[in-house]
């Protein structure tokens, strides 16, 4: 299979998805590692380590919960960019050359 511009452009989509997910998991994993053990036990299972609901959130986990929300927003923005990009690539691939 020959590498065409469409395949190269689609590779950018997959790179954005994979790298944004890996970035978020790395940030969360480092933040969890820095928490005391009793606070780590309050979190959800790996890899997302979901914080408890805000109503039962201890003071020691407030910064972690804020980091968790911020990284989710960054990941969602990057995923939105990636899906807009792949839609653009598919549109141009279906439109055909010189159309």
Image (cartoon, rainbow, N blue to C red):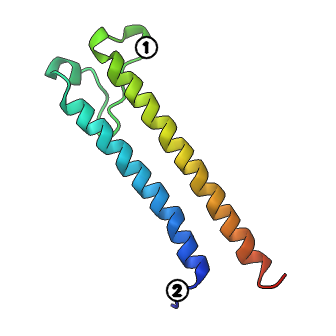
> In this figure, which residue is indicated by the disc labeled 2?
3
Q: Secondary structure at mark 2?
A: loop
| Residue situated in front as seen by the camera: 77 or 57 | 77
* Residue with the most extreme bottom position: 2
Left or right: residue 5 compared with residue 66 = right
Mark nearest the camera among 2 and 1 is 2
Asked whether the residues under the numbered discs 2 and 1 touch, taking CB atoms below 8 Å apart as contact, a structural biologist would say: no
Placement of the C terminus among the 4 image quadrants: bottom right
Q: Quadrant of residue 77?
A: top right
- The percent position of residue 32, horizontal first and vertical second, equals 24, 31
- The residue that appears at 27% across and 13% down in the rendered structure is 60
Q: Quadrant of residue 27?
A: top left
* Residue with the most extreme left position: 37
Answer few, some or many: residues within 10 Å of disc 1's Cα (few below 14, many 20 plus, some between 14 and 19): few
Q: Eyeballing the image, is 89 above or below 50?
A: below
Q: Eyeballing the image, is 99 above or below 72?
A: below
- The percent position of residue 35, horizontal first and vertical second, equals 20, 24
> In this figure, which residue is indicated by the disc labeled 1?
54
Q: CA distance from mark 2 to mark 1?
A: 49 Å
- The residue that appears at 29% across and 25% down in the rendered structure is 43
Left or right: residue 2 compared with residue 32 = right
């Amino acid at each position: 299979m020959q590498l065409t511009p469409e395949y190269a452009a689609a590779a950018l989509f997959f790179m954005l998805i994979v790298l944004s997910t890996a970035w978020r998991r790395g940030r969360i994993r480092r933040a969890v590692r820095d928490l005391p053990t009793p606070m780590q036990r309050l979190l959800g299972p790996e890899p997302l380590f979901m914080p408890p609901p805000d109503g039962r959130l201890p003071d020691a986990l407030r910064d972690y919960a804020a980091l968790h929300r911020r990284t989710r927003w960054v990941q969602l923005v990057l995923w939105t960019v990636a899906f807009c990009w792949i839609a653009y690539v598919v549109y141009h691939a279906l439109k055909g050359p010189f159309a």
